Image (cartoon, helix red, strand yellow):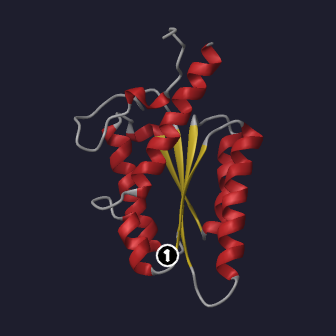
Amino acid sequence: MPNYRIIDGAQSLQHRESKAGDAASDLRVAVVAARFNADIVDAMLDGALAAWQRQGGAAQDLTIVRAPGAFELPLLARALANTGLYDAIVALGCVIRGDTAHFDFVAGEAARGIAQAAYDTGVPVAFGVLTTENVEQALERAQPARMDKGGEALEAAIEMALALREIARS
């Protein structure tokens, strides 16, 4: 097999069961976390903070910004990305389906806006917005000891930042 050059930002990430690593040791990351559905988003934020520490990130290199809800995440993510201070942004929120079309509008626009912020700025913006049918599903996904979607989003942001850094060095 030929010796292909592979760029994989995940190569230096530590898994939850592993000892601490240093993948994030020279990165600056911002987390934008919604206040709406705070119990759920706060659990996701706990998972993200644990992942940051596990990956060797320094407390002073992580900024946390609170947004009113998931709909407002893209604007804050874009504003943070445009500062040039951050290697990656993580957007955390939770939209739970109700009886009206509100869920579809908020979830769709949050997803579109978060992706657009990344495309327009060139800064990775990890999508950590839960879109669930009910509170039970949201709690299962949010808890760090369960599915840890906050930790996953932060690690995706680190992976993307490292991959883009490697591409820039090519």
| Position of residue 158 in the picture relative to residue 108 (left or right) | left
| Position of residue 84 in the picture relative to residue 29 (left or right) | right
Q: Quadrant of residue 110?
A: bottom right
| Position of residue 106 in the picture relative to residue 20 (left or right) | right
Type of amino acid at the residue the image marks with label 1: Asn
- Kindly identify the residue that appears in the image at 52 percent across and 28 percent down: 162
Q: How many labels does the image show?
A: 1
Q: Is residue 113 above or below residue 168?
A: below
Q: Is residue 1 above or below residue 93?
A: above
Nearer the observer, 145 or 85: 145
Q: In which quarter of the image is residue 70?
A: bottom right
Q: Is residue 162 visible?
A: yes
Q: Residue 71 appears at what percent x and percent y?
A: 67, 68
Residue occupied by mark 1: 37
- Kindly identify the residue that appears in the image at 68 percent across and 39 percent down: 83
Q: Residue 104 appears at what percent x and percent y?
A: 68, 75
- Kindly identify the residue that appears in the image at 38 percent across and 42 percent down: 52
Q: Residue 85 appears at what percent x and percent y?
A: 61, 35
| Position of residue 35 in the picture relative to residue 85 (left or right) | left
Quadrant of the frame with the C terminus: top right
- Kindly identify the residue that appears in the image at 38 percent across and 72 percent down: 139
Q: Which residue lies furthest to the top in this view?
A: 3
Q: Residue furthest right?
A: 120
Q: Is residue 34 above or below residue 59?
A: below
Q: Residue furthest front?
A: 1
Nearer the observer, 6 or 141: 6
Q: Residue 137 appears at what percent x and percent y?
A: 42, 74
Instruction: For mark 1, give the secondary structure.
Output: loop
Q: Is residue 39 visible?
A: no
Badge 1 crowding class, 10 Å Cα cut-off, few under 14, some 14 to 19, many 20 or more, is some
